[in-house]
Amino acid sequence: MEVQQEYERIKSLFAGIDEKQLSLIDGSIMEMARIRIKLNSLNEIIEESGLVKIHSENPRLQKELPVSKVLTRMQASYMHYVAKLSSILGRNIDDEDDLGVSEYE
């Protein structure tokens, strides 16, 4: 349910773009929604466990927890989708602006 809500939220940002373009990026929107929900879950785990386990008697002894590695990879993936989808959204806005200017030329 959460994924579907996030999918709808992201998809609403693309309201007004060409239907073919929206159809083309639909899978990317869904994957971005999935990753966002997973990131939220990972952050809940991190709230409880932290990213690094520190030895109680010797703070110099530290161990990175697996969740920190997963979080880093998922954040990178999420940011990749954000960049790609926002460039499509930005390009669409720029195209509309150009059309508006050309009417007055």
Image: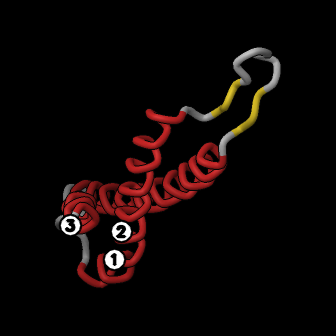
Q: CA distance from mark 3 to mark 2?
A: 15 Å
Q: Is residue 88 visible?
A: no
Q: CA distance from mark 2 to mark 1?
A: 5 Å
| 35 with respect to 15 (left or right) | right
Q: Which residue is mark 3?
A: 1
User: Height in image: 59 above or below 11?
Assistant: above
Label number found at residue 26:
1
Q: Is residue 103 visible?
A: yes
Q: Label 1's element?
A: helix
Query: Disc 2 residue type?
Result: Ile
Q: Which residue is mark 2?
A: 29
Instruction: Say few, some or many: other residues with alpha carbon within 10 Å of mark 1 (under 14 / 14 to 19 / 20 or more).
Output: some
Which residue appears at 38% of the width and 65% of the height?
34
Instruction: Find residue 95 and report its image quarter.
Output: bottom left
Query: Disc 3 residue type?
Result: Met
- Location of the C terminus (image quadrant): bottom left
Which residue appears at 35% of the width and 71% of the height?
30
From the viewer's side, name the closer residue of 99 and 18: 18
| 35 with respect to 95 (left or right) | right
For the residues bearing labels 2 and 1, Cβ distance under 8 angstroms: yes
Instruction: Find residue 101 and report its image quarter.
Output: bottom left
Residue 65 in percent (x, y) is at 66, 42
Residue 32 in percent (x, y) is at 41, 63
User: Height in image: 39 above or below 84?
Assistant: above
The tag earlier along the polypeptide, 3 or 2, is 3
From the viewer's side, name the closer residue of 92 and 15: 15
